[in-house]
Image (cartoon, rainbow, N blue to C red):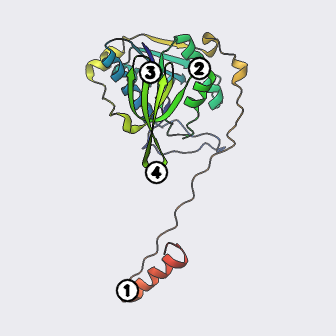
Amino acid sequence: MKILVLIKQTPDTEAKIRLSSDNKTIEQGDVKFIINPYDEFAIEEALKLKEKLGAGEVVIASFGGDSAKELIVKGLAMGGDRGLLISSAGLEGTDSLGIAKVLANAIKEEKADLVFCGKQAIDDDNMHVGTMTAEILGWPHVNVVTKFELTGTTARVEREIEGGQVEVYDVTLPAIFGAHKALNTPRYASLPGIMKAKKKPFDIKTPADIKVDVGSLKAKSIITGYKYPPEKPKGKVFAGEPVEAMVDKVVKLLREEAKII
């Protein structure tokens, strides 16, 4: 069984984000990039499944620039068998639909039996790409997966929905599944794993190499700008008065300004 894991590079959750002068991008010079955290749960589930089956291949794949290479290698260090980078050079403005078209072609070219990805990326938070990719392929797709079991070519999966409820699906492969953090606990890359990762197969291709019509990747949605969230107003401090008077003032503010009582 060939299992493809789609990963995306995102800014570190602790990175301080600064906007470019035109407010249309973020400054990336000193920003540390990591594997999108939800994608690590996808990698772990792929590795667990391969171990359970006792055979198969786990391919760590991404559409991105050169900086994505080291993140794919990290996935290989965790236990992936082969890396695949589809270069985004010259296509940096591609939107979610364009990215989904590239990934769908990569999946077809790889003849993958099963695809895992994160339920969403922590940067744009849009949850589009996995679903769009499945739709282009004509494959079933289940997102926010919290439990995965495979029997033959049928996967029984559970997913969270609002209100703490759980939905259960039986899905015939091939299919795409979006991993939630409740699905598993990702393993750390061991030192031997890191050393082995450097020698594992790693393919770098362009969209044209996987038969993508580059002209079809023109963005249909364009980001016109970013802005910082408004700063929180400074808190009000009461001191030097009788406690009863200060409590009355706090209650008045909670009722008339905060409107929470």
- Give how far across and how far down residue 107 sits, in percent: 54, 16
Q: In the picture shown, does residue 187 fall above or below 123?
A: above
Q: CA distance from mark 1 to mark 2?
A: 66 Å
Given the image, on which type of amino acid does mark 3 rest? Thr
Q: Is residue 196 left or right of residue 222?
A: left
Q: Is residue 215 left or right of residue 192?
A: right
Earlier sequence position, callout 4 versus callout 2 = 2
**Number of the label disc, if any, that sits on residue 170:** none
Crowding at label 2, few (<14), some or many (≥20) Cα neighbours within 10 Å? many
The residue located at (49%, 48%) in the rendering is: 162
**Number of the label disc, if any, that sits on residue 163:** 4
- Give how far across and how far down residue 230 sits, in percent: 57, 58
Question: Does the residue at mark 4 contact the one at mark 2 (Cβ under 8 Å)?
Answer: no
Question: Does the residue at mark 1 contact the one at mark 4 (Cβ under 8 Å)?
Answer: no
Q: Nearer the viewer, mark 4 or mark 2?
A: 4
Given the image, on which type of amino acid does mark 1 rest? Gly
Secondary-structure class at tag 2: helix
Disc 2: which residue: 104
Q: Quadrant of residue 251?
A: bottom left
The residue located at (42%, 12%) in the rendering is: 1
Secondary-structure class at tag 4: helix
Residue 94 in view, yes or no: no
Earlier sequence position, callout 1 versus callout 2 = 2
- Give how far across and how far down residue 110 sits, in percent: 52, 11
Given the image, on which type of amino acid does mark 2 rest? Ala
Q: In the picture shown, does residue 94 fall above or below 22?
A: above
Secondary-structure class at tag 3: strand
Disc 3: which residue: 154
Disc 1: which residue: 240
Q: Nearer the viewer, mark 4 or mark 3?
A: 3
254 or 92: nearer the viewer:
254
